[in-house]
Image (tube, rainbow, N blue to C red):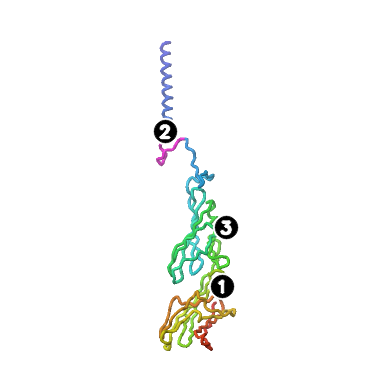
Amino acid sequence: MRSTISSVVPARNRRIRTAAGAAALISAAAMVLTACNDKDGAATPVSAAPATSVAANGAPNSSNTGGASQSTVRTVGKTGWYEGFDITVNKATVVPDEFGGAKVLIDITYKNTTLDNKTISTNTSLLVGGQVDGGASWDNPTVPGGGSAAGKVTTSVKSAKDADHLIDTMTVVYGQASDNQTKIPLSAAGAVESVQPKTLPVTGTLTQDQTTIEVTGGKLSPSYTKDENGKYELALHIKIIGGPGISAGGANIFTEYFSVKTPDGQSLVADDRGTINELLDAGKTIDNAKDYVVFVVPAPGTGPYVLTYNSQKADGAATAPTLPFTVS
């Protein structure tokens, strides 16, 4: 009996040790499989440290983004007017970067209402929180006469937090404080500060000797020339008709032959920003879409006017034809 008992005990101990060893082996295998079978196929150490974003200076960023966040897009859809353009700010997008900052992109459409190919001037700025953003970059296209093209403003910010509030603080500005400005705020509640050009139904004729000037329409808009805050441009389109008695070689028609009496009593000669320089032959009609007589008048530009045409100033013409009209 004693020999039987002693032979059984070692056998049971061997079974226990064998079971423990198998469990340890299974556990080790599970750890190896965990290390080698990450869900996207990349090996991941069992004891891997959490990822840390790195700033541009090489230092760890205290705000661990764990990858790029979603962009914030604001539809703006506001229109202002400047230098012959209809300017529509379409949308603003805040795109976070891996360093905790962001890039802001403002998409704009420029519609050229003039007949010439034009690029809007660089007299522009982006206000952020009421301050000029000196780092803003403007991509202003050259737009064909009567056409449209896309433009863009971009800038970088140090923090991508509260992107909606950031957009609310931004305003796209055309012109300086000493000029007639256009301001388009990106906030939903902000009102556009701009004056829409006005089409004028002005018509009539002025005849002097063998020349007839026919006014076929007009327009009124703020002047965007530097330091002309409080001034407007009154532009009258003219058609020029030659009588049968014009001598050979034709008659010259120049800008300075036109003047206007303003509602406040000023007498103004036409400005050369609307150049008239035509040679009129007998029996001919000049109907040039670009022939506008332009006067720089006090704002708001409304009230009664009297247009005068006089090509005989050097001869001391006693009378010159006039055309009264009213801008409302």
Residue 158 percent location from the top left of the image: 53, 51
- Camera-side residue of 240 and 19: 240
Residue tagged 2: 32
Residues tagged 3 and 2 counted as in contact (Cβ below 8 A) = no
Which residue is denoted by mark 1 in the rendering?
A: 231
Q: Residues within 10 Å of mark 2 (few under 14, many from 20)?
A: few
* Nearest to N terminus: mark 3 or mark 2: 2
Residue drawn at the location 42% of the way across and 16% of the way down = 10
Secondary element under disc 1, as helix, strand or loop, is: strand
Q: Callout 1: 10 Å neighbours few (<14), some, many (20+)?
A: many
Instruction: Please state which of the two labelled residues, at mark 3 or mark 1, is closer to the viewer.
Output: 1
Q: Which portion, as a residue range, is magenta?
A: 35-46
Which quadrant: the C terminus?
bottom right
Q: Residue 82, percent across and down?
A: 51, 68
Main SS class of the magenta portion in the image: loop
Mark 3 / mark 1, whichever is N-terminal: 3
Front residue (pair 128, 316): 316
Residue type, label 3: Gly
Q: Is residue 269 above or below residue 25?
A: below
* Residue that mark 3 sits on: 129
Q: Quadrant of residue 300?
A: bottom right
Is 281 a magenta residue? no
Task: Tell me how far mark 2 sits from mark 1, CA to CA.
Answer: 81 Å
User: What is the spatial separation of the Cα atoms under label 3 and label 2, in whole angstroms?
Assistant: 55 Å
Q: Nearer the viewer, mark 3 or mark 2?
A: 3
